[in-house]
Amino acid sequence: RMQVKRVVLSSRPGNNGAPVPANFRLEETTLAPELKDGEVLVRTLYLSVDPYMRCRMNEDTGAEYLTPWQLCECVDGGGVGVVESSRSSVCAEGDVVTCFNWPWQTHAVMKGCVLQKVEPQLVDGHLSHFLGAVGITGLTALFGVREKGNITKGANQTMVVSGAAGACGSIAGQIGRLDGCVRVVGICGSDEKCRALVEDLGFSAAINYRHEDVPARLRECCPDGIDVYFDNVGGAISDTVITQMNSGSHVILCGQISQYNKDVPYPPPLSEEIQEALRSKNITRERFMVLHYMNKAEAALFELSQWVKSGQIKVLETVVNGIENMGDAFCSMMKGGNIGKQIIKVSE
């Protein structure tokens, strides 16, 4: 029998509580060596932690497409790994595979049919990119911008991104620029992140919401108003952006991380004043779900991989080593401790 380490949900933070590392527990367990037909043994290379997982820590996730994590059960999420042995026709020994519901274990026995084989050359061997820029995060950014942003080349549009130094926002802003926005402004929570957005990723400007006057800085950075808003955070920052949007502009409603530790419906209700601003200026703000566009995923992942390979999209990652640090990495990401995609490296 094989000894493996895994992370289980030890306790829930409560509907209105902030998660703490102690909500997770590291355990040792054993795997049976015999695979059944259709099963594969995988070794985990990288795991992902993402804001939506906060909803899975509650008994009721508040979203019909998310199942809650169960107490004392192994936690799961995006992962990438390598097949060590296989009794499945889908993947062979040595294949690199990924899926959305990868258990937080050093090794796992999984059904081959839930795994997707990926080609390392698509990401020049940076396999963690399959969890970020050339994975579900990149697709969320691309489909959000393309399906809800209404960007037209040559139309002198300005885009604002909140949570701009996070996994999704950092990619979305770059796609907005590539698709034709003349100005892309990011909002984030530290001077270091602001510097990365402007110097590394080519944003026109960045605003530190913790230390700067956001309404005044937005007016300064967006002299022609705001045409597209990629919203990752919700709350007061989004209200501020919406009040400065132009008539006929578009909110891409991607995430509401400022609200995830509160027991409110998703998307959280807006104030009367903000609803009136949306109505009077004819601003679209429709809920956006990446899973609705998966029929276009293959072509989109290829486009993303070409951008990353050519350097047109730069990828930022914060990598933590060791499965024992999953809880710390998750809680840090929820507080904005990461720049770009938060990744946990489990093995070489």
Image (cartoon, helix red, strand yellow):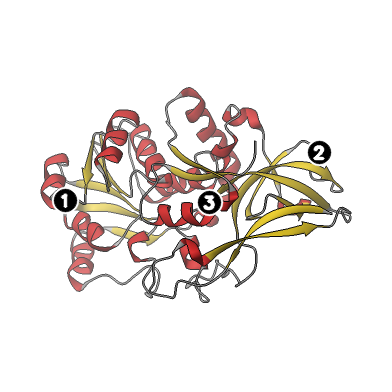
Q: Quadrant of the N terminus?
A: bottom right
Q: Nearer the viewer, residue 291 or 79?
A: 79
How far across and how far down the image is residue 185, in percent? 25, 41
Q: Which residue is mark 2?
A: 93
How much space separates mark 3 and mark 2, taking CA atoms? 28 Å
**For residue 221, what is the image quadrant?**
top left
Q: Quadrant of residue 36?
A: bottom right
Q: Residue placed at 43% from the left, 36% from the top?
A: 316
**Amino acid type for the residue under numbered disc 3:** Asn
**Residue at the disc numbered 3:** 325
- What is the CA distance from the residue labelled 2 to the residue labelled 1? 52 Å
26 or 277: nearer the viewer: 26
Q: Please, what is the three-letter code of the amino acid marked with disc 1?
A: Val
Residue 192 image offset from top left, x and y in percent: 28, 38
At mark 3, the secondary structure is helix
**Which numbered disc, 2 or 1, marks the residue that appears first in the sequence?**
2
Q: Residue at x 73, y 60 (%)?
A: 29
User: On the rendered structure, is 29 left or right of 252?
Assistant: right
Mark 1 lies on residue: 214
